Amino acid sequence: MKNNLWSVALFVSLSVAAQDDLLRQLEAATEPSTQYTIQTFKSTRLVNSQTVESKSQGELEFIFAHRFGLINDGIYELFGLDQAFVRLGLEYGLTDRLGIGFGRNSVDKTMDVYGRYKVLRQSTGVKNMPITLTAFANMAVETAPRNRDLPEPLSFEDRTSYTAQVLVARKFTDKLSLQLMPTLVHKNTVDRTLESNDQWALGAGGRYKVSRSIALTSEYYYRFDVPAASPYFNAFGVGVDIETGGHVFQLVLTNARGLTERAIFTETTGNLAEGDLHFGFNVTRTFQLKKEK
Amino acid sequence: MRLILSWILVGGCALSLSAQKYISEKSVVSFFSDASIEDIKAENTKSTSLLDMASQDIAFSIVIADFKFDKKLMQEHFNEKYLESEKYPKSTFAGKVVGFVPGTGGKQNVTVKGRLTIHGVTREVAVPGAMEVAGDKIVANAKFIVTLEDYNVPRPQLLWKNIAEQVEVTVSFTYKPYEK
């Protein structure tokens, strides 16, 4: 009897082993594939800056961003809430890698158009790629002040600036992602005593997921060769990403009030040393316009 | 002695039938969840399976990232937040077909018993299905319910209650003889 029991036990364990062996044979017969990293960041925006993320093909993202006044303006300004700077924008994924977008920011009544292209995608497996690299470029036109309010009119060229960025990111763990952002801003017309036409900056930032739906973010932009007379500061920001289905809510604290690249990287007015911070948020909503087939 | 003899016998049988392995050539694994706001469905056509007709052992391997959703963002959330496919890239099954009588034609109702692994959690399951031999091909179908909680798949707590507690999984495989 005992012998039989042992033989049953042995038979069961042998058959389980045989089944597992079959699974191993199956895995061996399966062609190896490449696993692309997804969701390095929850949004196309880190705090103020762009991330390597692009929209998937056929996705339309509506971005509604707000920066309030300075918190240290105190109770009279309701800690900045009496003022608001807004950017409304749309971004669309032409392919899974190529995106286009446009928006309007109330700071200097700036219109911007941009494109981004995911050149490299972080992956493991057959194709091993340690980073995701996205090229980003935009053009922004300040429509304020109006020519009729100026003694001498400004041409379209005078009002135009360009930003080019190489965004390099790596998702180190499922929680931690870091990004480097070499940046060039070109302004057609500047006051040369305060700034130059071409301005270089290097940004660094990252996110840390504290739960499945919540992440902490932060970024800092260091500007190179800044003239001593410059009234502007390096842009800094921290934030919390909250993701709920098709929405991402990003609550931020930053010394930048602008919401286009030119304004963020080269015209940040908040002095951190004096505690100049703005509260703000970015809200995104993604719509799937075209189904993949 | 008898025991050893019987094992040799079993081993011999297994050896003589070792050519009777079948590998999937076409497959569809899909799931459907009837949620309050919108139904969720996804389809995976890249799953693979190996079937040993001699021992009636069966194995499945399903790459989670290969599930395609209508909404790309939902697909990303499915991978990133629920199935955590970077940590648990595959779902597997290893088990046995019970109730299949070789040599009889037509569709036969069978039960597939074994260990199903989803999201890194392995559970013993028994799933009813159907198998049919058509020429040198074998067609297998099954439909069953997976309870997310059983596999530690979290459900959304915030606004988007899009994933139901239970999802209905449909699998359909066509096998061809496997030479190896």
Image (spheres, coloured by chain):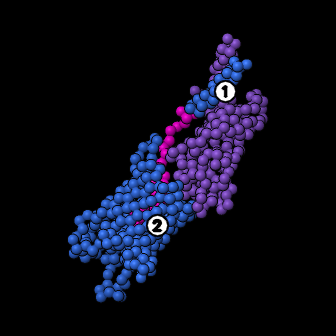
Chain colours: A blue, B purple
Report the side of A82 relative to B46 (left or right). left
Question: As displayed, is residue B1 above or below residue A31?
Answer: above
Going from N to C along the chain, the mark reached first, 1 or 2, is 1
Quadrant the N terminus of chain A occupies: top right
Query: Main SS type for the magenta part?
Result: loop
Identified at 32% across, 69% down, the residue is A272
Where is residue B164? Give x, y as percent: 66, 55
Identified at 46% across, 63% down, the residue is A240
The residue carrying mark 1 is A12
Report the side of B94 relative to A109 (left or right). right
Quadrant the C terminus of chain A occupies: bottom right
SS type, badge 1: helix
Q: Magenta region: which residues?
A: A26-49
Identified at 65% across, 60% down, the residue is B38
Tag 1 near tag 2, CB within 8 Å: no
Where is residue A68? Give x, y as percent: 43, 75
Name the quadrant containing residue A202: bottom left
The residue carrying mark 2 is A251
Q: Residues within 10 Å of mark 1 (few under 14, many from 20)?
A: few
Q: CA distance from mark 1 to mark 2?
A: 56 Å
Q: Residues within 10 Å of mark 2 (few under 14, many from 20)?
A: many
Report the side of A189 relative to B71 (left or right). left
Identified at 62% across, 51% down, the residue is B42
Looking at the picture, which amino acid does disc 2 mark?
Leu
